[in-house]
Image (spheres, rainbow, N blue to C red):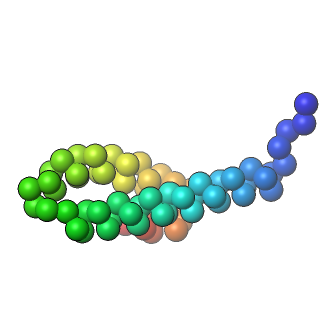
Amino acid sequence: MSEPSSSSSSSAAAKSDAELEEMLDRMLTRLALSDDSKLQALLARLLPMTISSLSSTSSAVRNKVS
C-alpha cells in the first residue's frame, strides 16, 4: 500500500481552502443582503462556521473571516 505523496495531499488541502474561501464569500454576501427580521436566525447558523474558520491553516481563509 502506498501513501499519497505530500504534493497530492497539499493540493487537496489547497482545494479545500479555496472552497472554504468561496463559501465564506457566499456567506458574507448572504449576510449583507439579509432582512433584519431574518438576521438572528442567519447569524445563529453562520457564526459557528465562521468562528471555526479562524483556526484554518490558510492565511487567506483567516483574513477573509477577520
Q: Residue 9, position in %: x, y?
A: 74, 50
Q: Is residue 55 left or right of residue 6?
A: left
Q: Nearer the viewer, residue 43 or 51?
A: 43
Q: Residue 53, position in %: x, y?
A: 44, 53
Picture quarter containing residue 16?
bottom right
Q: Nearer the viewer, residue 65 or 37?
A: 37
> Residue at the spot x=48%, y=63% of the render?
22
Quadrant where the N terminus is found in the figure:
top right
26 over 52 or under it: above or below? below
> Residue at the spot x=19%, y=63% of the render?
34
Q: Residue furthest top?
A: 1
Q: Residue 25, position in %: x, y?
A: 41, 66
Q: How many discs mark residues in the rendered view?
A: 0
Quadrant where the C terminus is found in the figure:
bottom left
> Residue at the spot x=80%, y=56% of the render?
7
Visible in this render: residue 65? Answer: no
Q: Nearer the viewer, residue 52 or 12?
A: 12
